Image: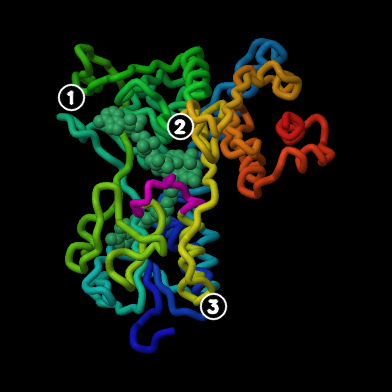
Amino acid sequence: MSNQYDYDVIYLGGGVGAVNGAVPLGKHGYKAAIIESTAIGGTCPNFGCTPKFTLDVPAELAYRTSQFQTIYGGNKLKVDWYEDMQRKHRNIDADPAGGMKKRLKAAGVDVIHGYGKLVDNHTLAVNGKHLTTDKIVIATGLTPNHIDVPGTELTHDSTHFLSIDHLPKRLTVIGSGYVAIELATIANEAGADVTILMHRDRVLRGFDSFLVDKLVNSLKQRGMHFVPNSDIKAIETHNDELVVKYQDQKLATDYILDASGRNPVVHNIGLEEVGVEYDEHGIKVNDHLQTSVDNIYADGDVINLGKPELSPVATFESKYLTKQFIGETTAAIEFPPMPTNVFASPRLASVGVNPEAVEQDANYRVQRSVLSGEMYYKASGQTVAARTLVFDKDDFLVGASELSDQAEDAIEILNMVISWHISRKQIQGLINIFPSLGSNILTSF
Ligand SMILES: Cc1cc2nc3c(=O)[nH]c(=O)nc-3n(C[C@H](O)[C@H](O)[C@H](O)COP(=O)(O)OP(=O)(O)OC[C@H]3O[C@@H](n4cnc5c(N)ncnc54)[C@H](O)[C@@H]3O)c2cc1C
Ligand SMILES: NC(=O)c1ccc[n+]([C@@H]2O[C@H](COP(=O)([O-])OP(=O)(O)OC[C@H]3O[C@@H](n4cnc5c(N)ncnc54)[C@H](O)[C@@H]3O)[C@@H](O)[C@H]2O)c1
């Protein structure tokens, strides 16, 4: 611990990465501070995971019940967007990241509201003051991309979309990644006429196309439109409506969500002045999450490590950094398999080895199965469900993906099988609950 500086560690940016690093440091008696310009907790609890999930739950329920439409007398549940948004305002906006703020306070972490910049490798400037510190952690996250076409200022980002009280009748979404598919699915269930303008010809790149194709077909059957290789040229206003010019076509619409990706926050925070190296994918770090300047580290989405940009990954990194700072480890960071889920309906989740990357490799065996005919999925009304498993040459599970109404939980189970290297024999020695999602998965081994 340092007497030479105001703080032992200052986090620049106050997202999940920073909060989950600063709290344990504070509890261990270290002087820690967080500088945050927008909202404590950052993207996930304020503008990302939590508001999205809150709005999604009724939409997902509507999708699930639609599979029992005949049983409900032919009536389909329809999401009331306005009411759903009021629920989100009450649950999230009334006390944003309330739990995190309490934890920071209890741990004695100073929270400084303002825009911070590095001055030198031990000094940060915020609100016209200089704060000194032994170590700095840059945790500035990502910011939405804006497509580079005339009229881009007429589009909105996910933060805006997750706060609108009135759902547009016609919604156009630029991009077909996580944000695009998740928010488009919710809007579609709430009755908007949704068009996805794809950059190229694949939706949700990185996921197994055997599963993605089934998700896209299901969304198309439920009224969503997909335009591959859309080649957007301009966005204009004509009378009261927006017009997107793409290929040689025009699309009239009421709202445009730009979900064309997110870029690391690396500009205008003093990186050049202090010599912290970065590129367009983020801050460069070594296997100790240390930047090109010895006492400056980076954490979370802003890091360029080619890993998934997910909340639990940012938390994993901040816990590792805490252990390093308090002297509990000197080892390099080792990432376990990182599971991920697209909160569409149905869900699409995956973990471990990507089946498409090893399909032709004799060291692996890829097993794809349609689940909708199996008892558990059939009885629970799941008409769109499939799973892909990847086994290594010793018959251990090394990769798993699932498309189903409970894919995120299926993949949590399979993540343990992969991460803890559980053998087929061990799984076969268990007694399961029947019927259940778990037993459907485990008895398939
Ligand atoms: C719509 C959406 C939905 C998502 N859903 C999920 C999900 O379901 N599950 C999941 O795991 N992940 C999800 N994510 C991703 C998740 O939000 C991020 O992985 C996570 O927030 C990363 O945390 P972080 O701390 O690295 O960055 P952030 O949470 O982005 O925090 C960075 C913070 O730094 C602040 N900052 C930046 N520059 C400065 C400065 N100079 N001075 C002071 N403060 C500064 C910003 O204001 C921000 O609050 C979603 C993202 C989006 C956009
Ligand atoms: N459920 C979750 O865990 C979750 C949810 C949302 C976001 N996230 C995280 O946030 C990150 C960012 O998500 P995202 O959806 O913003 O990014 P993304 O990288 O997943 O998707 C960006 C999309 O925009 C498209 N695109 C790029 N340039 C374009 C252009 N000029 N015109 C049209 N389309 C264009 C890409 O082809 C891609 O489909 C993700 O990588 C993910 O890690 C996670």
Type of amino acid under label 2? Ala
Q: Is mark 1 within 8 Å of ligand 2?
A: no
Q: Earlier in the sequence, mark 2 or mark 3?
A: 3
Q: Quadrant of the C terminus?
A: top right
Q: Can residue 158 be seen in this view?
A: no
Q: Which of marks 3 and 1 is nearer the N terminus?
A: 3
Q: Nearer the viewer, residue 307 or 348?
A: 307
Q: Name the residue under label 2.
A: 357
Q: Does residue 53 sit above or below 365 in this rendering?
A: below
The residues colored magenta run 302-313
Q: Mark 1 points at which residue?
A: 234
Q: Position of residue 262 (x, y in %)?
A: 32, 42
Q: Where is residue 275 in the image (x, y as percent from the top left)?
A: 21, 66
Type of amino acid under label 1? Ala
- Image quarter for ligand 2: top left
CB-based contact (under 8 Å), mark 2 and mark 1: no
Q: At 27% from the left edge and 40% from the top edge, which residue is drawn?
A: 145
Of marks 2 and 1, the one in the foreground: 2
Q: Distance between the Cα atoms at labels 2 and 3?
A: 43 Å
CB-based contact (under 8 Å), mark 3 and mark 1: no
Q: Quadrant of the N terminus?
A: bottom left
Q: Distance between the Cα atoms at labels 3 and 1?
A: 54 Å
Q: Is the magenta stretch mostly helix, strand or loop?
A: loop
